[in-house]
Amino acid sequence: MTEEPCQCPDCQRFYREHDRLIREFPTLKQQQELNWASIQSFRTLCGKVTEELQKNLSDFETQSNLDNENHQLSATEFSDSINELENINAYLFSIEALMEKIFETKVSEKIEAKFKEVAGELAPDPLNIDRIILNRLFHQAPDYPDRRTNTN
């Protein structure tokens, strides 16, 4: 019995987003810029949320009584979340350092054209009949041997 790729909504959304990013950004330069912007936006958002949580924790610690019905976070939850977000920011900073090396790579127009060609093969228009047939063929083979199964 052959295994099918995961059909859960999360995996399906990932497959669609993966293909969309290849279709819309089919060159090395576009992928470099996309990934740089993605990392920067992630760092900015995590940094801002971390600042807000730190401010909230400071405010929380100055309060003498907390109304439990407001479902506010406890001091421990604030601290744990701040620590986790700081870890994420450290990882993102490391990725950013690696991305700087990737940005040093430049390729010729012929190689950029090859990127576009391969992108069209990897992520063709999802409504194209050839793509639909290709998807059916791909779904006859497993994505990963240890992939999670749909429990819904």
Image: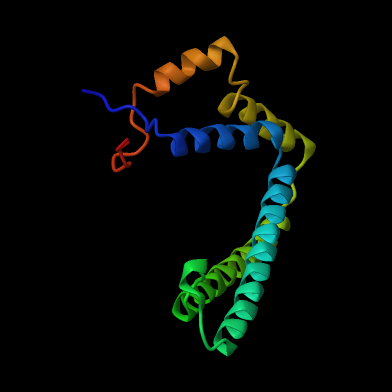
Kindly tell me whether residue 135 is visible in this rendering. Answer: yes
Q: Quadrant of residue 62?
A: bottom right
Q: Quadrant of the N terminus?
A: top left
Q: Residue furthest left?
A: 1
**How has the structure been colored for display?**
rainbow
Q: Quadrant of the C terminus?
A: top left
Who is closer to the viewer here, 113 or 35?
A: 35
Residue beneath the point at 75% across and 34% down = 110
Residue 126 image point, x, y percent? 58, 21
Residue 91 image point, x, y percent? 55, 68
Relative vertical location of residue 39 with respect to residue 50 in this rendering, above or below: above
Residue beneath the point at 70% across and 37% down = 25
Kindly tell me whether residue 71 is visible in this rendering. Answer: no
Residue 112 image point, x, y percent? 73, 37
Who is closer to the viewer here, 36 or 77?
A: 77
Relative vertical location of residue 112 with respect to residue 99 in this rendering, above or below: above
Residue beneath the point at 60% across and 13% down = 128
Residue beneath the point at 33% across and 41% down = 147
Q: Is residue 24 left or right of residue 56?
A: right
Q: Residue furthest top?
A: 129
Q: Is residue 48 left or right of residue 121?
A: right
Q: How many marks?
A: 0
Relative vertical location of residue 111 with respect to residue 37 in this rendering, above or below: above
Q: Quadrant of residue 115?
A: top right
Relative vertical location of residue 141 with respect to residue 128 in this rendering, above or below: below
Residue 102 image point, x, y percent? 67, 56
Q: Quadrant of residue 44?
A: bottom right
